[in-house]
Image: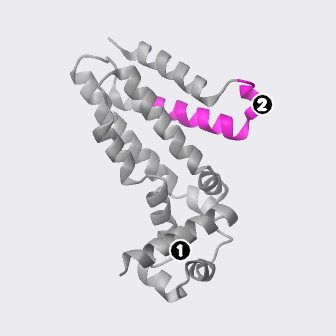
Amino acid sequence: MSSLTADKILNASIILFSQKGYDSVTTKEIAREAGVSEMTVFRHFLNKRNLFEKAFETFIFSPQFKSFFENNLEWDLEKDLLKISYCYQDTLLKNRQIILMEFKNDDLTSTFDAPLLKFSGELKKLLIEYLAKMQEKGVIKENPEILAVNFLAANFGLFMTFLVNGDLTGNIGLETCVANYVRAFAKGITV
């Protein structure tokens, strides 16, 4: 199995999925775009669903996010949460077409293992680990899992608000909203 071939297929699929939506794209189109046979697509990914999930994982929740948590934290609650928020917002923004596409697909969002849910779940785990360490250090007082859920929900809500309802935000930028939210959140949970 050639890594280069798989990468070509993934790149072609993410372009087509984001342009046309999951239901409208065929494996034949993906193969044509990648310059391979349809059988090669199946050999690498078994089916369209697996290909979509792998593309989503590769382009939205890449190992870079885990690396971010391993290498970019300062163990200063507000600074770290702000960095995490900006990284999350940046990832969501770069992949907004795919995220919107996933919301349009009943087939993808109705299953428990929908790629967007996997991404949120992985990020939640990393955030819980971080918050649990901050709790051990005596910095925060609340349950790390509840805090992680609230933090991610608010961030995703801000992203969606700016994406679909710009009238609500007026002249206020996303960065300003995120910074203000993080400051209030960090202040509210510290001991």
Dividing the picture into quadrants, the one containing residue 45 is bottom left
By secondary structure, the bulk of the magenta-drawn segment is best described as: helix
The N terminus lies in quadrant: bottom left
Residue linked to disc 1: 48
Which sits in the foreground, 14 or 114?
14
- Amino acid identity at mark 1: Lys
Q: How many marks?
A: 2
> Quick one: label 1, few (<14), some, or many (20+) residues within 10 Å?
some
> Quick one: label 2, few (<14), some, or many (20+) residues within 10 Å?
few
The C terminus lies in quadrant: top left
In reply to whether residue 103 is colored magenta, the answer given is no
Point 63% across, 79% down: residue:
29
Q: Residue furthest top?
A: 191
**Horizontal and vertical percent for residue 35?**
55, 83
Dividing the picture into quadrants, the one containing residue 140 is top left
**Horizontal and vertical percent for residue 132?**
27, 29
Relative to 158, 78 lies left or right: left
Residue depth check, mark 1 versus mark 2: number of the one nearer the observer = 2
Relative to 56, 191 lies left or right: left
- Amino acid identity at mark 2: Asp
In reply to whether residue 165 is colored magenta, the answer given is yes
The secondary structure type at the circle numbered 2 is helix
For the record, the magenta segment spans 151-171
Disc ID at residue 167: 2
